[in-house]
Amino acid sequence: MLNTTANKITVLRIVLVPFFLLFEYLGRHDIGFALFVTASLSDLLDGYIARKYNQITVFGKFMDPLADKMLVLAAMCYLIEAQVMPGWAVALVIFREFAVSGLRLIAAQQNIVIAAAPSGKFKTACTMVCLCIMLCFIHVAPLWVYTLCTVLIVLTTLYSGFEYFWMNGHVLKEK
């Protein structure tokens, strides 16, 4: 399980999530933000290491996207509470994640692996950057910054979700 550097970095990302929230709620936004950025960048690092050093594992395939979801949703929930991100946007993100995960489960039952699509990777990058902006400038940026970030997150989330179903919807057809 933790026999690779990439998997250790993935687990570190999961461990950082509650500490990110803790420092945000303690009012130490500087530390919370630094932890969020570190965790976000660790996603790039573990993917790079896994590919470069052939450390791709079943554990990593499952836990890496789960770690991303934990980090993103924790930040979004905090931003809802801080009143800089609307709950409906987070609900759409959660709906997309459940829908794509469900599609992947159905595909897996048919021995089909749905790999991460470029639009899904772009969605993750866009979401992480937008969340970094929103967290960095929490309560000091003009409303349009939060609105623009929210719109970008929602649009890339919906687009990538639709693309997953467009490209892989055949797995939903009864045989």
Image (cartoon, rainbow, N blue to C red):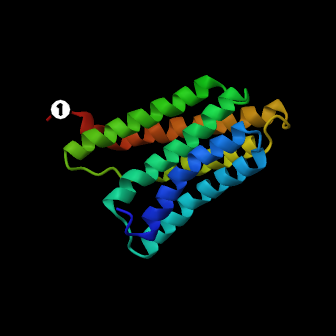
Residue furthest to the top in view is 88
Question: 175 or 7: nearer the eye?
Answer: 7
Is residue 122 in sight in this rendering? no
Question: In which quadrant is the C terminus drawn?
Answer: top left
Rendering quarter of residue 151: top right
**Could you say whether the residue bearing mark 1 is in a helix, strand or loop?**
loop
**Residue ID at (85%, 34%):** 142
Say if 152 sits above or below 47 in the image.
Answer: above
For residue 74, side relative to residue 135 (left or right): left
**Residue ID at (37%, 51%):** 62
Rendering quarter of residue 29: top right
Q: Give the amino acid type for the residue marked by disc 1 in the picture.
A: Glu
Percent across and percent down for residue 85 are 68, 30
Mark 1 surroundings within 10 Å by alpha-carbon count, few (fewer than 14), some (14 through 19), many (20 or more):
few
Question: In which quadrant is the N terminus drawn?
Answer: bottom left
Percent across and percent down for residue 37 are 67, 54
Percent across and percent down for residue 102 are 33, 36
Is residue 106 in sight in this rendering? yes
**Residue ID at (54%, 38%):** 157
Q: How many marks?
A: 1
Question: 2 or 72: nearer the eye?
Answer: 2
Say if 52 sits above or below 71 in the image.
Answer: below
Percent across and percent down for residue 143 are 81, 30
- Which residue carries the number 1 mark? 174
Residue furthest to the left in view is 175
**Residue ID at (57%, 46%):** 17
For residue 99, side relative to residue 22 (left or right): left
